[in-house]
Amino acid sequence: MCGIIGIVGLEGVSKLLIEGLKTLEYRGYDSAGIAVQDGSGSLVVVRRAGKLAELEGAVLEAEPFGRTGLGHSRWATHGPPTQHNAHPMVDTEGRLAVVHNGIIENHEELRAELVAAGVEFRSETDTEVFAHMVSAVVAGGASLPTAVRQCAERLDGSYALAVVSADEPDTIVVVRHQSPLVLGVAKGATMLASDIPALLVHTRQVIPLEDGDVAVLRPEGVEITDISGQAVNRAVKQINWDPVAVQKGGYRHFMLKEIDEQPAAVSATMLSRLDDSTGSIHLGDLDVLGDRLAKVERLTFVACGTSWHAGLAGKFYIENLVGMPVDVDYASEFRYRNTGAGPHHLIVPITQSGETLDTLAALRDVRSAGAPIAAVVNVPESSATREADATILTLAGPEIGVASTKAFTTQLVALYMLALDLAVRRGTMTHAEAEQRIIPLRRVRYAMEGALRGASHIAEVAQKYAHAQDFLFLGRGVNYPIALEGALKLKEISYIHAEGYPAGEMKHGPIALIDENLPVVVIATPGRVYEKVLSNIEEVRARDGKVIAVCAEGDERVAALANDVMEVPAVDEDLSPLVNVIPLQLLAYHVAERRGCDIDQPRNLAKSVTVE
Ligand code: AGP
């Protein structure tokens, strides 16, 4: 959840750390800090509560000069987001500083030991224990890497920890266990970060660390060992993301930029799996599973949040096209059930970040049961890509807005292609039938562009309803997950209570909520449930509810029933979620903007949820 960054060997490191933290701020943004080795052999620590701008202001006033340092942006777990709980945490002498992402579960026991030995704590965080522990071992004569290894062995929980000491110039030591940590290698400098985007301005050569890795970063390179000190080899990977992709590029918010990027992102994800010469589809990503795929009898999607919504659409695709039973589980629930996962059960984790701890934990559990795992992931070289048997990489590029948009639509297209590929492999669809379905798929980006052209009208609709206290979102069939996603987007960024429901379920309870104050967003585009949805709209109208309908361009029947319409180009029903979600994303965006909310960094949330 928190963002950590470290740089070894670059002049003007304070400003570079702040710039890196800006790229990572989506991970946590309630307080921030840096620790810099200055030229005079001491450590300068600056911390501030609040947004990164507070820290930036303080650093500009009295910039610590140096070439090596650490930075942190926090998503509070232990202790409120105050300055004294902001990282870096320092030891008693202020000569050693630590930043941490994760949770040290046995911190109370460790704290008690340190207090008994006379240490005075200055924060309520779980992290501070590590600063004092390492400091004590170093004081006993150990080197910094040895001390980090020894102390990490005593920790329970999840952590990416980075340590800098005034007494070890141009050196940072890191250790990773179940929290993401990536190293970067550049000419005459090395760096670390929680996520790849923070490194791109310096290098595209990265080394993702694995659990139990301890790395020593110096300007000339990195040395990696396991927790016992044995050297380990970790490959340097080349990342193809463009550094420009992590900038706003003239947009007011990353979210709006990312909404606009969807047609291109969906196309890229799709085209990389199409054979232009034959027009056929092939998910080479799955080949590594070999015969195991043929033996699969059922499939389970495990995911959280928006990615879970994509899984619900995936269930619709796979059940319809492959005829295989599909479950969709919240990752946090899946692990605590007896799911009977085994070799005949394909597990498909879906995760934008590839670092969501609930999803990774579910993945790890089923791996030990021998189930084949094919993950749908957006971030290359993330933990999920490394730990799954096969990875279907979505090509959304870096997604910075906390509210997921382009990652979602690329997940949808990846899952549709997974269904087509499995259907052909398993003989429930001929190559020719699959190719017929590819034709509208290739064209869907134009329909998405058409939906984006409705943005200014949607801004007007948003203005009309921005004062509402609750919203209901209704959809049926493959658009039921889109109703859920529309509701999630609205509540995440505008803080309006919103619920998504299958439209046919409304009469079994939620209908009691309907009155003249309740806006009801209904997805009413063509498809097998179109007439049923029209009846549901009538039911809302009969109770004075305000209907905002997503409908096909020129649909006069819906227009006659609804108070407001958000029109989209008509497409094949299976592909309609890719188009229909766009007006809902824009509605949430413009409502949040009208209400003056912090769209890219909504309260209490973080982009990557790396705690259970
Ligand atoms: C989406 O808008 C959310 N911020 C959140 O629900 C997110 O989808 C969820 O935390 C899962 O993240 P992942 O896809 O990176 O695993």
Image (cartoon, rainbow, N blue to C red):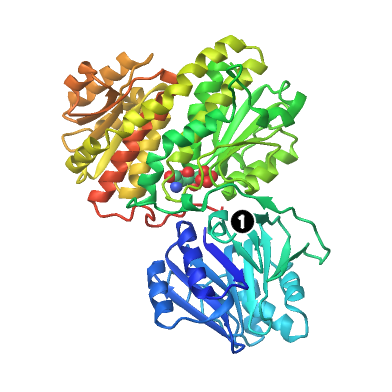
Point out the residue furthest to the right here. Answer: 230
Q: Give the residue displayed 22% in from the left and 32% down from the top.
A: 514
In front here: 352 or 199?
A: 199
Give the image quarter of residue 278: top right
Q: Which residue is mark 1?
A: 180
Hey, which quadrant is residue 115 in on the image?
bottom right
Question: In the picture provided, is 585 more to the left or to the right than 117?
Answer: left
The picture places residue 543, in percent across and down from the top left corner, at 18, 27
Say left or right for 51 vs 301: left
Judging depth in this view, the residue of 315 and 566 nearest the camera is 566
- What's the residue at 65%, 50% (across, down)? 238
Mark 1 Cα-neighbour bin, 10 Å: few <14, some 14–19, many ≥20? many
Name the amino acid, label 1.
Answer: Pro
The picture quadrant where one finds residue 426 is top right
SS category of the residue bearing label 1: loop
Residue 312 falls left or right of residue 232: left
Above-or-below relation of 301 to 382: above
